[in-house]
Amino acid sequence: MPDAFLGRISAGFLPGDAWACLALWIMDHLPFGADPNLFCTLFVLAVLLSALAPRFIFCPAWLCGWAIGLTILSPVGFSEMGSLPLQIGAAMLVGVWYVGVFLNLVQKRLVRLFTKHSDSKR
């Protein structure tokens, strides 16, 4: 995976997490029921996504960050979330860069090591 693509994924997760916080605040203040409030925030997100340049942000990552943030933060509520959004964002970045980059490099080196080692035994 190219690092630019991983950067776009990272750039998508973090605004998605921030949007989840904003969506919780908006849903607390909208006068409709839970389902219309969720629809309104999702609609606004879809409109915003269509207006953004997909060169910089990977839109599925933004939606995923929003969904993860909203799923974790909804039971907690906007007023009690504290530093939880920062922890969620950090976990997303660790997942992208540790699993996506570091472990990929380790796997490539192990495959190269073992294929070289098995070729020399023949």
Image (tube, rainbow, N blue to C red):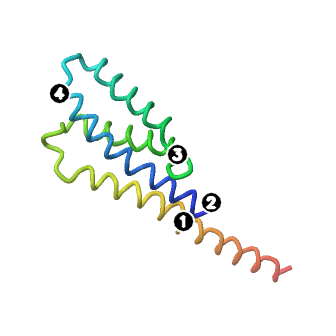
Return the mark for residue 1.
2
Q: For the C terminus, which image quadrant? A: bottom right
The residue lying at 41 percent from left, 58 percent from top is 93
Q: Answer yes or no: do the residues labelled 1 and 2 have beta carbons within 8 Å?
A: yes
Q: Mark 3 is on which residue type?
A: Ala
Above or below, 53 against 35 in this view is below
Judge the density around disc 4: few (<14), some (14-19), many (≥20) Cα neighbours within 10 Å. few
Residue 81: percent from the left, percent from the top?
18, 45
Above or below, 51 against 41 in this view is below
- Of labels 1 and 3, earlier in sequence is 3
Query: Mark 1 or mark 4: which is in front?
Result: 4
Q: Nearer the viewer, residue 105 or 10?
A: 10
- Of labels 1 and 2, earlier in sequence is 2
Distance CA(mark 3)–CA(mark 2): 21 Å
Which element carries disc 3, helix, strand or loop? loop
Judge the density around disc 3: few (<14), some (14-19), many (≥20) Cα neighbours within 10 Å. few
Residue 65: percent from the left, percent from the top?
40, 44
Q: Furthest residue to the right? A: 122
Distance CA(mark 3)–CA(mark 4): 30 Å
**Left or right: 58 in relation to 40:** right
